[in-house]
Each structure stands twice: as structure tokens, then as C-alpha cells.
Image: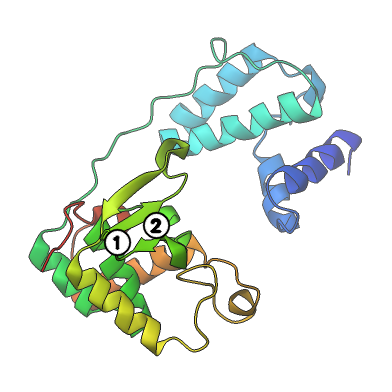
Amino acid sequence: MTRLRKMMLEELQLEICPSLPRNATCGLWRSLPFHKRPPDQVGPDQIRRYQAHLLVDRKLDANTVCQHLSALRFFFIKTLKRKWSVEETPYPKRAIRLPDVLSRGEVERLIDSADSPMHRMWLLTLYATGMRREERVQLKVSDIDSARMLIHIHEGKGNQDRDVMLSPKLLEELRGYWRRMNPKPKTYLFPGGGRAHAADVPMSAKSVFHAVKHAAKRAGLQKRVHPESFSPTPIVN
């Protein structure tokens, strides 16, 4: 393994994730256009030709090409300590796809198709508040303000705090969830399972994503469903 390659793989693991699998970092290295010249001699001209090769010859979509360019940018800035000019190496425009918004009936089918009562509570909270999944997993027990019928969200989108309405129906469901939980959540309203629960840390946002996907499949929904497909209009009854 060359010195530059070793440096890049080590920095990737430090910057992104200490436990990042080596096959993932090696795959990223292989995506870089270093087969014809030393890595530290690659410049904007070679990168533009490489980008055209990915788009025209390999027919990769814009999102995939952007991932390759991000790998190059990381190598230039973090490993070579060189500047990266967006003007000289522009990213291709990504296709913008509007999310499929579910009707109230489809959301009810989705919630009723949850794999477990716990998953049902996750989905119901998303629908009743319109909050994002990253905000939901960070909810704390102290954020539920039943006296003012509000849910306090801290450092949401744009690192902004805000309040959302707590409907009577959701409050009733949350109280039922609390009665069923054993042991009771200490800090986070939805703690992680197993060791994460014992350590009093929040669950993973990825768990919410998979819960939505599984429920959509069980409900037979044909739309592209993800946590952001829920209507932001709270339920009040």
C-alpha cells in the first residue's frame, strides 16, 4: 500500500467513522483516477476528463458522480493539503425528485401496518407532529410539555429550537407507551434497545427509516415512502 493511499484511508476512518470497514475505504480509493499518473500530480484537467468519463462512458447518474468527486475533494484537501476549486471542477446537477406525500388514509394504513407497538408509536409521533426523524430520536422525556400541550424540539433544522403542537390523541398514546415501557426511559423518550437502552442513549435514526419502509411494504403502498412522506399537519382527535 502506497504512503498516500495509507494516509487517505486513515483520515477517512478518523473523519467519518473509526470503525469504517476497510473494504469501503479501499473501494473509495479505487474510484479515484490515479491509474495513469501519480495521485499528487492529478490536476483540474484530469479531473474534468474523469468526470466526463463517468457521465458519458460509464453512464453513471449525477449522484454517483458527485460521490466520486467528493472522494477526490477529500483526498486533495485532507491528504494532499491542496485547495479544491469548485469553479474548475463543478459538480454535475443532481436530479431533484419531489417526495411522494401520503394521504391521511394511506398514513393510517401505514401506522396500522407497523411491525410492533413500539414502531407504531414512532410512526404516530412522526405523523402527529411533522417532525423529522433526526429530531424524533433526540426527543427527551422533559420535552413533552403536557401542561402547555407542546413538544419542545431542540436544535432542529438549522440548529433552531421550536415548539410543535401536542395533540390530545398523541398525548394519550404517549402515556400508554410510557406505561408499557419497562424499564422507564430516563433521558430520551425513545432510547436505543439493548445496551443502548442501558446506557441511556437515543436510538438510531436509521431504525425509524427501516420501520417506515417495513410498514409501507406490509401496507402494500406503491409510493416511495420514507419518514419525510408524512403530512406535517398534526392530528388533533
Contact check, label 2 and label 1, Cβ < 8 Å = yes
Q: CA distance from mark 2 to mark 1?
A: 7 Å
Q: Residue 174 sits in which quadrant?
A: bottom left
Mark count: 2
Query: Residue at coordinates 50% horizontally, 77% vertically from top-left?
Result: 185
Expressed as whole percent of the image width and height from the top left, the position of residue 121 reads 32, 75
* Residue for badge 2: 133
- Determine whether, in the image, residue 106 is placed left or right of residue 79: left
Provide residue 77's location: percent of width, then percent of height.
73, 24
Other-residue count near label 2 (Cα within 10 Å), few / some / many at <14 / 14–19 / ≥20:
many
Position above or below: 230 against 81: below
Relative to 17, 148 lies left or right: left
Looking at the picture, which amino acid does disc 2 mark? Arg
Comparing 226 with 182, the one in front is 182
- Of helix, strand and loop, which one carries label 2? helix
**Is residue 117 positioned above or below 98 on the image?**
below
Above or below for 2 versus 217? above
- For the N terminus, the image quarter is top right
Q: Which mark is residue 126?
A: 1
Looking at this view, is 182 or 22 the one in front? 182
* 189 relative to 143, above or below: below
| Residue at the limit of the structure toward the front, as seen here | 147
Picture quadrant of residue 176: bottom left
Q: Which mark is residue 90?
A: none
Within 10 Å of disc 1 (Cα), the crowding (few <14, some 14-19, many 20+) is many
Q: Amino acid at mark 1?
A: Leu
Residue in the image at 44% along x and 54% along y: 134
Q: Is residue 60 at all visible to an observer of this figure?
A: no
Report if residue 183 is visible in the image. yes
Residue sitting at 42 percent across and 54 percent down?
Answer: 135
